[in-house]
Amino acid sequence: MVKPFSQACVNNQIAICQILERVFTDKKLVLEVGSGTGQHGVWFAKNLPHLIWQMSDREQNHAGINQWINDDPAPNLIAPIRLDVVSDPWPTARYDAMYSANTAHIMPWVAVASMFAGVGQRLLGGGIFCLYGPFKYLGVLDAQSNIDFDYRLQQQSAHQGIREFHDINQLAMNAGLNLREDNAMPANNRLIVWQKR
Ligand SMILES: C[S@@+](CC[C@H](N)C(=O)[O-])C[C@H]1O[C@@H](n2cnc3c(N)ncnc32)[C@H](O)[C@@H]1O
């Protein structure tokens, strides 16, 4: 099997890591939802050694994630667990931090809602959830690159598309999360930070 590779992860991991270092400074156990290739988990575990990083994804991505872990193991990096946020039970552990990147515009809306419900249930009080990706604000995408990306997503699948920030934040509030930060990131992305009440 060819090891999966995402150039986007290479491009964004340093900028994301700088924010995670700050907002996860007093955190320990992190659950990543939708780890994809596994590159982010490998990078963040290596660069944020005070964290224990638990990757997760649907089973079809585990072989690739395990290749990344095997090629670059770290004592604080745990083998991926199977987590389809709609159809799998969430792990019983309670996490003090959670992270997900580029998932909200790929999952159907019902899955985005499941993700927030699961985050709200498994995050400890005071815990932090970070969601990275592009978002619309009051229906507006201000970068042409995101307008083009949104169009491509919707052509690809009717259930995909860049989400409205206010809808996402409503899911977060319903799950017991308060908005703490909305960080502008390179390439017209955002890193949104919520805290569990
Ligand atoms: C565009 S990839 C992003 C991967 C990685 N986080 C990144 O930033 O490169 C979208 C990810 O969402 C995951 N995903 C889609 N639907 C999901 C679901 N229902 N439950 C869990 N993960 C899901 C996919 O398996 C994939 O890993």
Image: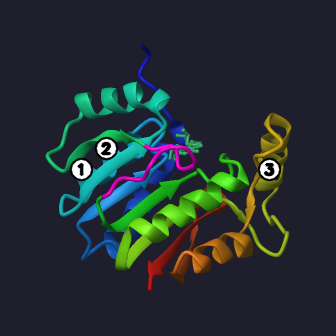
Kindly indicate whether the residue at mark 3 contacts the one at mark 2 (C-beta within 8 angstroms): no
Residue 110 location (% of width, % of height) = 69, 55
Q: Which residue is mark 3?
A: 150
Q: Is residue 89 magenta?
A: yes
Labelled disc at residue 42: 2
Q: Indicate which quadrant contains ligand 1.
A: top right
- The Cα–Cα distance between marks 2 and 3, rounded to whole angstroms, is 28 Å
Classify 10 Å Cα crowding around label 3: few (below 14), some (14-19), many (20 and above).
Answer: many
Residue 191 location (% of width, % of height) = 54, 67
Whether residue 166 sits left or right of residue 158 in the image: it is left
Residue 83 location (% of width, % of height) = 45, 44
Residue located farthest toward the top when viewing the structure as drawn: 1
Kindly indicate whether the residue at mark 3 contacts the one at mark 1 (C-beta within 8 angstroms): no
The C terminus lies in which quarter of the figure? bottom left
| Pick the front one: 113 or 168 | 113
Snapshot quadrant of residue 2? top left
Stretch in magenta: 83-92
Kindly indicate whether the residue at mark 2 contacts the one at mark 1 (C-beta within 8 angstroms): yes
Check the image and report above or below for 62 versus 35.
above
Q: Residue at x 38, y 70 (%)?
A: 123
Q: Which residue is mark 1?
A: 46
Whether residue 195 sits left or right of residue 46 in the image: it is right
- What kind of colouring is applied to the model shown? rainbow
